[in-house]
Amino acid sequence: MSAQQRENLDAILRQSAFPADSNVSELRRRLAELTSAQPLPAGVTVTAAALGGVPTAEITADGIEPRHVILYFHGGVYVLGDAFQAAGLASQVGRRTRATVISLDYRLAPEHPYPAAVDDALAAYQALLNGGTDPADVAFAGESAGGGLAVATLVNARDHGLPLPAAAFVMSPYADLTLAGTTMETKRAADPLLSPENLQPRVPDYTAGHDAAVGLISPVFADLSGLPPLIIQPEPTRCSSTTPSASPGRPLSPTSRSPSTSPPGCRTSSRPITRSSTRQPPRWTGPDSSCRRTSPTQHASQRNEGRTRG
């Protein structure tokens, strides 16, 4: 994204595209309207599918290696967005890693609060493995709430004894629903979209009475030991871009810094990098080295918001 494009986007977002006092239906309508005018990148194909009973959008582009899979989790503070609206950004991740992207259409709150999204994510990953996909050929990726869900799914898969994917890549993850990070205030003026006022009404939609500090809701509080390499790419203007200070009863899980470890096939470094595992990362032979930090526009599609799954 050029400096001019970023300035233009900042100006649009500051026009209160998503007012804090809007209800979820209105926010969804506004997001669909905003994304519907944005075309997919050239050469990208999106196909509706399902994985473990969870609807998905399978995203492919020329030159990919079909056996490599990115399981992608869209953003939207757990109440907005869908797998198709995220196809633009997800396709860029796929192109740079030369992998097929499966964008997950997990259930949304408030109709389906926690643990619905977490359950859907684990079901989809388990189905991928049951279908014969080698976990060494899989990476997770996601942005905003999807970034938080990607990390939560790593933790959940580990705790269920599943083999873990090769790596995960998360962009500005929404990983602390307690909203306790200091940047909620220090970056309030810099963030054109998010603020405590915007985020707070949506927290109970998702948590539905659960403690927001539960590790699968806010993975910043989870035990991250034994996970595969994880690259976290924060947006410096996002008010949710740093973790909170440890406090009694809610300690941060110990992690260690490591040299840059990018998603398979990607050679671009990003900071901060958290690597919580001492084991060697699984193999991935994606040859691409053209990772660039861009934010392409998204493509919209209709969804069935009232669906249920067992």
Image: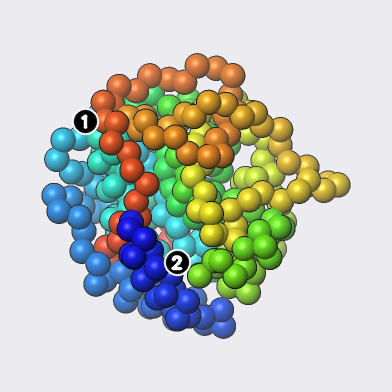
The residue depicted at 27 percent of the width and 63 percent of the height is: 299
The residue depicted at 21 percent of the width and 58 percent of the height is: 40
Residue 153 in view (yes/no): no
In which image quadrant can residue 32 be found?
bottom left
Query: Between residues 208 and 192, which one lies in front from this camera angle?
Result: 192
Q: Nearer the viewer, mark 2 or mark 1?
A: 1
The residue depicted at 50 percent of the width and 53 percent of the height is: 235
Give residue 291's mark.
Answer: none
Disc 2 to disc 1, C-alpha distance: 31 Å
Label 1's element? strand
Lateral position of residue 162 relative to residue 49, left or right: right
Whichever of callouts 2 and 1 sits on the residue coming sooner in the sequence is 1
Give residue 80's mark.
Answer: 2
Q: How far across and down, in percent of the image, does residue 197 sit? A: 63, 74
Question: How many C-alpha atoms fall within 10 Å of the one at disc 2: few (<14), some, or many (≥20)?
Answer: many
Q: Amino acid at mark 1?
A: Glu
The residue depicted at 13 percent of the width and 49 percent of the height is: 43
In which image quadrant can residue 190 be found?
bottom right
